Image (spheres, grey):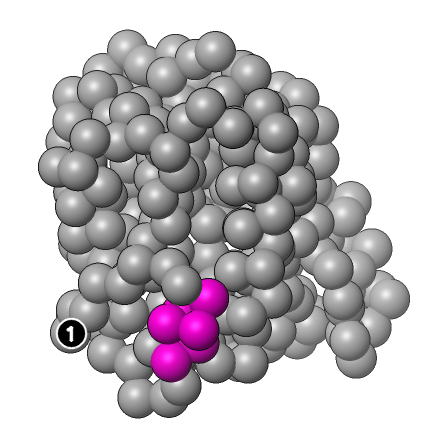
């Protein structure tokens, strides 16, 4: 079984597009012989996110953590307990490609770190776009880490100790422990994910905060 974990905190405006894309990836013909379980982890949601997940017919897990690391950890733990051999992570403000899961599995490794592409820059100035793209490598051999495009085997995850209950950079911290545990990691540009360029910062230090700082003219590492 393959498990997909999507942490959600009040994402009623974007969750539908995310789930539409994920379900297209699940329907890939090469996955016809494998069960794929989509799990939306509803973290302290007060909007219509739960109803949207229900309408799409996906499984949900309700938590009250306000912490993306804990939400991911609890979702992954449930899927592994249900027998998942491979876990794929994405975010509610992102849309995966139709071959997303296949592109991860084709790497034939313990962990796959994929890249992201901004789908709609909105009102963000061209100068900010250029600054971002000038520092981002969207191909094989990159060293970017995104919870919106991350996959791993259940065995590697357990060996590394799993997601920690961090409000930010829980994905970066996990990959560091994957490396320490000797996991085979593919830094691949093949699994494609489109994500949002919103500037409303929910967690300081996250991707939206990075874009906001660029928008303000600050020099920040990617």
Residue at 52% across, 41% down: 26
Identify the image quadrant of the N terminus.
top left
As drawn, which residue projects farthest toward the front? Answer: 33
Horizontal arrangement in the rendering, residue 158 relative to residue 127 (left or right): left
| Residue identified by numbered label 1 | 64
Q: Is residue 124 visible?
A: yes
Residue 28, image x, y percentages: 61, 34
Q: Quadrant of residue 29?
A: top right
Q: Quadrant of residue 68?
A: bottom left
Q: Nearer the viewer, residue 153 or 99?
A: 99
Residue 46 drawn above or below residue 59 = below
Q: Quadrant of residue 100?
A: top right
Residue 112, image x, y percentages: 47, 26
Residue 140 drawn above or below residue 10 = above
Horizontal arrangement in the rendering, residue 169 relative to residue 26 (left or right): left
Residue 191 drawn above or below residue 15 = above
Bounds of the magenta segment: 51-56
Residue 54, image x, y percentages: 37, 72
Q: Label 1, secondary structure: give it.
A: loop
Q: Nearer the viewer, residue 81 or 198?
A: 81
Residue 128, image x, y percentages: 77, 64
Our reading of the magenta stretch's main secondary structure is: helix
Horizontal arrangement in the rendering, residue 217 relative to residue 113 (left or right): right
Q: Nearer the viewer, residue 182 or 101?
A: 101
Residue at 83% across, 55% down: 130
Asked whether residue 52 is drawn in magenta, I would say yes
Residue at 34% across, 39% down: 3
Residue at 46% across, 57% down: 91
Asked whether residue 84 is drawn in magenta, I would say no
- Mark 1 crowdedness (10 Å alpha carbons): few <14, some 14-19, many ≥20: few
Q: Is residue 176 visible?
A: no
């Amino acid at each position: 079984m393959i498990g997909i974990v999507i942490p959600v905190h009040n994402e009623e405006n974007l969750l539908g597009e995310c789930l539409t894309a994920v379900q297209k990836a699940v329907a890939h013909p090469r996955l016809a012989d494998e069960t794929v379980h989509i799990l939306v982890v509803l973290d302290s949601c007060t909007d219509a996110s739960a109803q949207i997940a229900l309408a799409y017919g996906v499984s949900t897990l309700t938590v009250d953590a306000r912490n993306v690391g804990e939400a991911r950890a609890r979702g992954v733990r449930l899927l592994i307990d249900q027998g998942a051999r491979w876990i794929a992570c994405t975010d509610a403000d992102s849309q995966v490609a139709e071959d997303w899961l296949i592109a991860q599995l084709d790497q034939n490794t313990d962990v796959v770190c994929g890249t992201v592409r901004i789908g709609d820059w909105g009102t963000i100035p061209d100068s900010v776009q250029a600054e971002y793209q000038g520092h981002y490598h969207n191909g094989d051999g990159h060293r970017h880490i995104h919870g919106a495009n991350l996959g791993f085997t259940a065995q590697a995850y357990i060996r590394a100790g799993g997601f920690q209950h961090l409000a930010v950079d829980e994905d970066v911290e996990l990959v560091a422990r994957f490396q320490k545990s000797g996991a085979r990691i593919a830094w691949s540009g093949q699994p494609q994910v489109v994500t949002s360029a919103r500037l409303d910062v929910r967690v300081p230090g996250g991707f939206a905060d990075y874009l906001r700082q660029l928008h303000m003219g600050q020099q920040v590492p990617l």
